[in-house]
Amino acid sequence: MGMPIVALDNVQKRYAMGDFEVPALRGIDLQISEGEFTVIMGPSGSGKSTLLNLLGCIDVATEGKVIVCGEETNSKSEKELAKVRRKNIGFIFQAFNLIPVLSVYENVEYALLLKGIPEGERKNAVDEIIEQVGLTAHRNHRPNQLSGGQRQRVAIARALVTRPRIVLADEPTANLDSQTGKSILHLMQEMNNRYKTTFIFATHDPDVLSFAKRVIRIHDGKIEKDGAQKKSAPKKKSARTRKSA
């Protein structure tokens, strides 16, 4: 394990609803090390998306301390938070969030345009990541010409092309069939191993668990369980099964 890339200390988040405050997170203590492949698991309304928003510098805590890539977020302005996001974080969403009038290449390139990367450097980076996610043959296609799995591969390429330290994925398999979802998770695992990028998922999909190195279970805004994911040993074949195989 490396040094924590994110750290939360007694974090609480409350939202105003008229004259009332609704608690979304209730005293979260959490550290995630660089290079982890972590799943935040919980039912709808458990607080997992709120937690992801804090880690992604999209929102700030009501109380407590959130540190992302060495930056304490609660003391920062919106402009400063945006700078932390651009520098360190890539996002993958369940709805893909691709720009429909742009091609695969242009959707991926857009993330580098926002950072002011020169054209030659952009081309090399985009060509490389498109090849790695298996979309070279579709580089000139627009999103409406792609399957759901291919669109999610574009989203992964867009998230990774800037070489972020953290990739946050909010229900990345929710709009995919089971087999396609697994192929996407395999791809993310491969990217995690290749680039040592920290992947943090929020999901309620149990199929994602088999890919996780660490599972954090959250319920009613609190962490109920946090630990390394145990891989089940393959079942031994019976003598009868071995004979018939």
Image: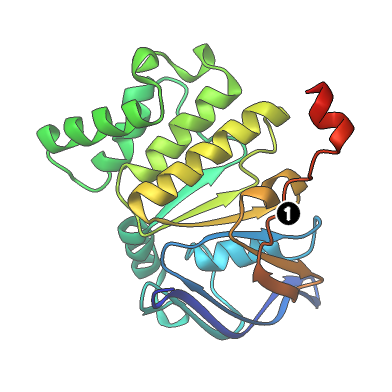
Res. 75 image quadrant: bottom left
Is residue 6 or residue 184 the one in the foreground?
184
Total marks placed: 1
Tell me if 237 is positioned left or right of 202 in this view. Answer: right
Dot 1 alpha-carbon crowd within 10 angstroms: few under 14, some 14 to 19, many 20 or more: few
Q: Quadrant of the C terminus?
A: top right
Res. 24 image quadrant: bottom right
* Applied colour scheme: rainbow
Residue bearing the label numbered 1: 232
Element at label 1? loop
Identify the residue at horizontal 36%, vertical 78% (top origin): 70
Identify the residue at horizontal 79%, vertical 45% (top origin): 235
Q: Measuring from the top left, give residue 25's x and y in whole percent.
A: 71, 75
Identify the residue at horizontal 62%, vertical 39% (top origin): 94
Identify the residue at horizontal 18%, vertical 30% (top origin): 123
Is residue 100 or residue 91 the one in the foreground?
91
Q: Quadrant of the N terminus?
A: bottom left
Q: Is residue 178 above or below residue 219?
A: above
State whether residue 98 appears in this view. no
Q: Is residue 127 above or below residue 164?
A: above
Q: Measuring from the top left, give residue 104's x and y in whole percent.
A: 38, 23
State whether residue 218 appears in this view. yes
